[in-house]
Amino acid sequence: MRATVVVFPGTNCERETAEALAGAGFDTRLAWHEEAAEGADLYVLPGGFAHGDYLRPGAVAARSPALEVVRRAWQGGAHVLGICNGFQILQEAGLLPGALVANVPAGFRSRWVALRPRAARGAFGRAVGGGRLRWPIAHGAGRFFAPEEVRRELWRSGRVLATYEGEDPNGSLDRIAGVVDASGRVAGVMPHPERAVDRRLGGEDGRAFFLRLREALADGGEGDG
Amino acid sequence: MTWRVRLAVLPLEGMRSPEGDTAAAALAALGFGPPSGMTVGKLYEWTAEGDDAEVVRRQAMAMAEALLANPVSERAEVVDVREVRGAPA
């Protein structure tokens, strides 16, 4: 399974994301955004502040040629994962629904959160598994926002990947922490699974996520049902 | 003709604006009867060429749709389009 981690100016989580993928058995490469090419099974847009978050988080990266490469690869059957800023980029590119807006109450939050998987469809639903997860968050604009009819459709069609449990970290509507698209092959998560891959980092629930993701992709990208 | 354009991008009506809440609370602490419904956005200002103000206005809204505003969470409005007199043709 080949994974490409796309790096924009201002991305800052690419190394730990690549390490986490490699640790889970992906044949992983980092690709500077101008050099991203088709041919991978999985594209990961990591966290950070692509293009300085100018205009809005993800707005400039979403309109760059690299996203056209990612879009074509997805159309050809590849899977795409956005983590934190990568989630914002995928929404701005129209590949995922909703927007991630300023936290309520205001402020940057950097801490561990509890997540409840919501039995989403496809490989990403299988990857988050069925049990409670602990992953860290680090964001100032992570409040999931979408009109009520959009959220209703996400719930109805099994596209909510996970919700926050316990103390509300950012005011996300319906407490949504991650979603998948209608194809089931594009996912976005606000918390950072790549920062939860070793007990020395404080937890390893993220390692299981990447391992199950590789297994699911090796099985043809299907979920459990 | 040369025009100076100002375009405001604000959170959608009714959306929580944590930055606005913070500013309102700080103003209240300074003794201003607390402003209600304060929201914070961005103002873009630039110079454009065009035959009339309406053409320039439409182009500004097209720029908002293409990049400057995210319709999921924001609204854009042209604040004003002022002719710049004496500008080189």
Image (cartoon, coloured by chain):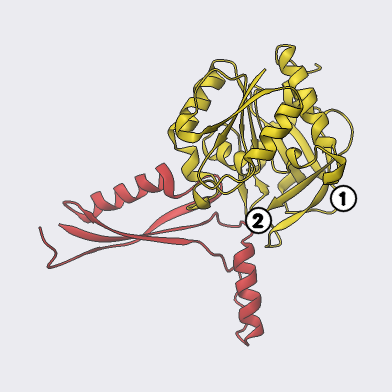
Instruction: Tell me the distance, in whole angstroms, between the alpha carbons under discs 1 and 2.
Output: 19 Å
| Crowdedness near tag 1: few (<14), some (14–19) or many (≥20) residues, C-alpha within 10 Å | few
Q: Which residue is mark 2?
A: A140
Q: Which chain is red?
A: B
Looking at the rendering, in which quadrant would you find the N terminus of chain A? top right
| Crowdedness near tag 2: few (<14), some (14–19) or many (≥20) residues, C-alpha within 10 Å | some
Q: Which residue is mark 1?
A: A166
Looking at the rendering, in which quadrant would you find the C terminus of chain A? top right
Q: Amino acid at mark 2?
A: Gly
- The answer to whether any part of residue A188 appears in the image is no
Q: Which mark is residue A71?
A: none
Q: Amino acid at mark 1?
A: Gly
Query: How many numbered marks does the figure carry?
Result: 2
Residue at the bottom extreme of this rendering: B31
Residue drawn where x is 49% and y is 41% of the image: A61
Report helix, strand or loop for mark 2: loop
Residue drawn where x is 63% and y is 56% of the image: A102
Q: Which chain is yellow?
A: A
Residue drawn where x is 74% and y is 55% of the image: A110
Of residue A155 and residue B69, the one placed in the foreground of this image is B69
